[in-house]
Image: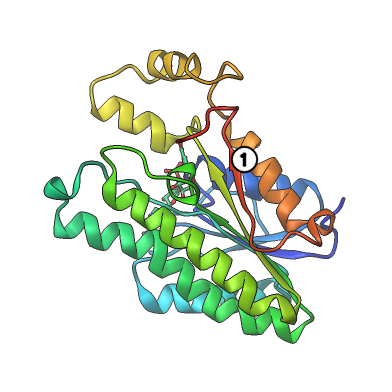
Amino acid sequence: MRFSGRSALVTGAAGGIGAAIARQLRAEGARVAVADRDTGGIEAEAHLPGDLLDPAYADGLAGAARAALDGLDIVINNAGVITRGPVTETTDADWSLSLGVNVEAPFRICRAAIPLMAATGGGAIVNVSSCWGGKAPGPNHAVYCMTKAAIASLTQCMAMDHAHQGIRVNAVCPNEVNTPMLRTGFARRGFDPDTAVAELGRTVPLGRIAEPEDISDVALFLASDAARYVCGALVEINGGKAVA
Ligand code: NAD
């Protein structure tokens, strides 16, 4: 029960990776506030539904979580969207959506959370970047990769600037993960998701793509006291399939 007495906010908690993180934090003793567009049916100590594209909602999430849980020790910025294509096929709507959810919302949440956490001695923030951002971009997802590089950079900047307040900021950088984000992408492009996931798994040295728990285990390590000297790290979780 390494998170007993800790309070955590998890965004994107209705999705594949976010649900695993929220479930595992609670299983290990944390009190958890879940945020997503629809949080119905998620087991948690507090439900904070809303749209992260709404600046007032994103600005208020950390305070709302602290009020609901009577504390805030851990923030997991996990919510994300993926848009595909090179810049020449990227619409204004894709741009606003990607920047809004993947970069602006975590910026707003961290800006509000850091002073709250500092006032009670510190805490841990874990951002969900991607191997396509933490390390190098991949093809045909220009704006997605750029947003994941932006959150990786923001992670390193915040880690440097707020370590002295007892706040550790780190990011996980997954490669492919078996979640609705990946599966709906396959379905939209006319592939059977199970077949496509199995084929993709054969390109990974460990023989399969990640399951959400492969990512949540590392996110929880970074949020835990075992990672007390880890600050500003971008941790690749890729089954041995490194990007160039
Ligand atoms: P997912 O689609 O299952 O979950 C994402 C969640 O974010 C959803 O529940 C969605 O409702 C929420 N969300 C999106 N826009 C929102 C908004 N405007 N307001 C509130 N909530 C919103 O995807 P996932 O694969 O679990 O992704 C989680 C994170 O992992 C994302 O940041 C993603 O970029 C990252 N990631 C995923 C993969 C992968 O292969 N699945 C790889 C690398 C990184």
At 83% across and 59% down in the image, what residue appears? 225
Q: Position of residue 201 (x, y in %)?
A: 50, 18
Q: Is residue 174 above or below residue 26?
A: above
Within 8 Å: ligand 1 and the Cβ of disc 1?
Answer: yes
Q: Position of residue 140 (x, y in %)?
A: 25, 38
Residue type for callout 1: Ile
Q: Position of residue 82 (x, y in %)?
A: 34, 46
- For the image, the number of numbered tags is 1
Horizontal placement of 59 versus 113: left or right? left
**Which of the pair 117/146 is nearer the observer?**
146
At 55% across and 71% down in the image, what residue appears? 157
Q: Position of residue 112 (x, y in %)?
A: 55, 80
> Would you call the spot at circle 1 few (<14 residues within 10 Å), some (14-19), or many (20 or more)?
many
Horizontal placement of 47 versus 225: left or right? left
Q: Secondary structure at mark 1?
A: helix
At 77% across and 58% down in the image, what residue appears? 30
Q: Is residue 115 above or below residue 178?
A: below
Quadrant containing the C terminus is top left
